[in-house]
């Protein structure tokens, strides 16, 4: 029994990378719109003692959420670039292999 083969479509790989990148850009746009919406609410908890405590907690949680979300969107974008590079590198490797096989064929006659 021979080993099963597989086909690699570098353009589909690059397309998947572009899709990931597009999703990251959409998430970023949605996140920025959501932040604008939140800012529109102002500080509904008020300025009394309890309101100040709620506001402090909210701000701390919000800052952590912003950092996490921004890191995740940046990671998605980086992964998208890497996926696209995989497709490009596959094409380069195939081209190199063709050159090397032809060189061996020429040497062996």
Image (cartoon, grey):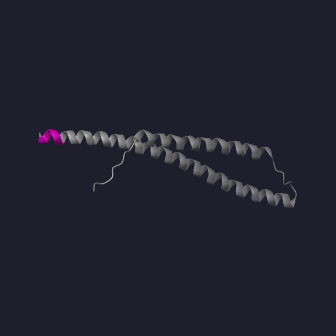
Residue most extreme to the left: 109
Q: Identify the residue shown where x is 30% and y is 39%.
A: 95
Spot occupied by residue 71 in the image (x, y as percentages of width and height): 58, 51
**Residue 81 or residue 46, whichever sits in front:** 81
Residue most extreme to the front: 1
Q: How many labels, in total?
A: 0
The image quarter in which residue 61 lies: bottom right
Q: Which residues are magenta?
A: 104-108
28 on left or right of 109:
right
Q: Identify the residue shown where x is 16% and y is 40%.
A: 105
Residue 32: say if magenta.
no
**Residue 43 or residue 7, whichever sits in front:** 7
Spot occupied by residue 82 in the image (x, y as percentages of width and height): 45, 46
35 on left or right of 85:
right
Q: Identify the residue shown where x is 15% and y is 38%.
A: 106
**Residue 89 or residue 59, whichever sits in front:** 89
Q: Main secondary structure of the magenta part?
A: helix
Spot occupied by residue 45 in the image (x, y as percentages of width and height): 84, 54
Classify the position of the N terminus by image quarter: bottom left
């Amino acid at each position: 029994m021979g080993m099963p083969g597989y086909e690699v479509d570098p353009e589909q790989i690059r397309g998947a990378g572009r899709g990931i990148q597009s999703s990251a850009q959409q998430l970023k746009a949605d996140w920025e719109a959501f932040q604008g919406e939140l800012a529109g609410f102002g500080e509904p908890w008020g300025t009394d003692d309890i309101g100040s405590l709620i506001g402090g907690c909210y701000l701390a949680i919000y800052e952590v959420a912003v950092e996490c979300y921004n890191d995740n969107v940046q990671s998605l974008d980086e992964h998208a670039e890497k996926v696209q590079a995989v497709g490009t590198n596959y094409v380069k490797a195939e081209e190199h292999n063709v050159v090397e096989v032809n060189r061996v064929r020429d040497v062996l006659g």
